Image (cartoon, grey):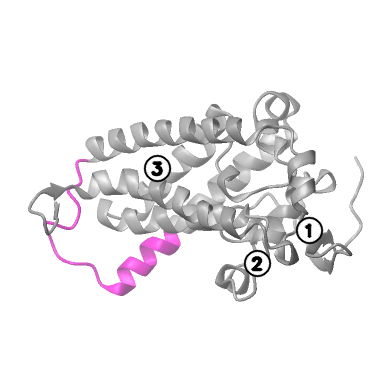
Amino acid sequence: MSASEMGFAVSDELLGTFVPILVYWLYSGIYALLGSFEDYRLHSKKDEDEKNLVSKRTVIKGVILQQTIQAVVAILLFTVTGNDGDSAGPKHSLIVLARQFVTAMLVLDTWQYFMHRYMHHNKFLYKHIHSQHHRLVVPYAFGALYNHPLEGLLLDTIGGALSFLLSGMSPRVSIFFFSFATIKTVDDHCGLWLPGNLFHVFFGNNTAYHDVHHQLYGTKYNFSQPFFVMWDRILGTHMPYTLEKRADGGFEARPAKEVKEE
């Protein structure tokens, strides 16, 4: 248990459930405030308002529904595993923690790549489930987790549970891992190419990379999320991009090679 300075205790399991949700809204809120900087946008504010096929009110309600489902599953998972975190037993070394983080990242990426790609290739699943996420033709930060509830369960919730279990991390470590994964997912959908963004420096899978996927010509490419691009490269679905300045300000992510038609 993690005791606060005020004298009451909050379990690592509870923090691992709700801190990533709080991080989601705080981080996406920052990007919402920065969205007025047209010189750094991948799409104009006008395009965001006109091209998207769903209202922001509906997006917010959809995200809250998904986060509610995630919270319920997380509480059940922590209850079943019965892991009381780091309060008992030895402290892990930085090497062990790094291994757990990398393992969880690889597990989450692998699960999401194949599930995500299958939802594009299966016409029934795309039409009735995954197309909901692609109503955001112009992505923005707090729409990162806007999905059909079944997709949210399959991709994000089950993928997160597998990464937690297979990495062997404790509930305390999961607080940091899932907060990090949440920040990365929000960043990939933020629609801004800000100078000095470390995610753009250290990850090939970034805001522009995922923006290509959200465009009509990109729905057969760049399925990888949220961290690495290895599966796209290995299986031939990798679409590199170029960043070009728009005449009205900002940038545009364009495919760097010819897009194959079906």
Mark 3 residue element: helix
Q: CA distance from mark 2 to mark 1?
A: 11 Å
Q: Quadrant of residue 254?
A: bottom right
Residue 85 is one of the magenta-drawn residues = yes
Q: Is residue 166 above or below residue 157?
A: below
Q: Which residue is mark 3?
A: 161
CB atoms of marks 2 and 3 within 8 Å: no
Image label count: 3
Residue 180 is one of the magenta-drawn residues = no
> Bounds of the magenta span?
82-103
Q: Nearer the viewer, residue 16 or 30?
A: 30
Q: Residues within 10 Å of mark 2 (few under 14, many from 20)?
A: some
Q: Residues within 10 Å of mark 1 (few under 14, many from 20)?
A: many
Q: Residues within 10 Å of mark 3 (few under 14, many from 20)?
A: some
The spot of residue 94 in percent (x, y) is 30, 73
| Residue type at tag 3 | Ala
Q: CA distance from mark 3 to mark 1?
A: 29 Å
Residue at point 78%, 64% (across, down) = 250
Q: Is residue 181 above or below residue 125?
A: below
Q: Is residue 129 above or below residue 246?
A: above
The spot of residue 213 in percent (x, y) is 74, 49
Q: Which residue is mark 1?
A: 239
Tag shown at residue 204:
2
Mark 2 residue element: loop
Instruction: Please tell me which of labels 2 and 3 falls first in the chain.
Output: 3
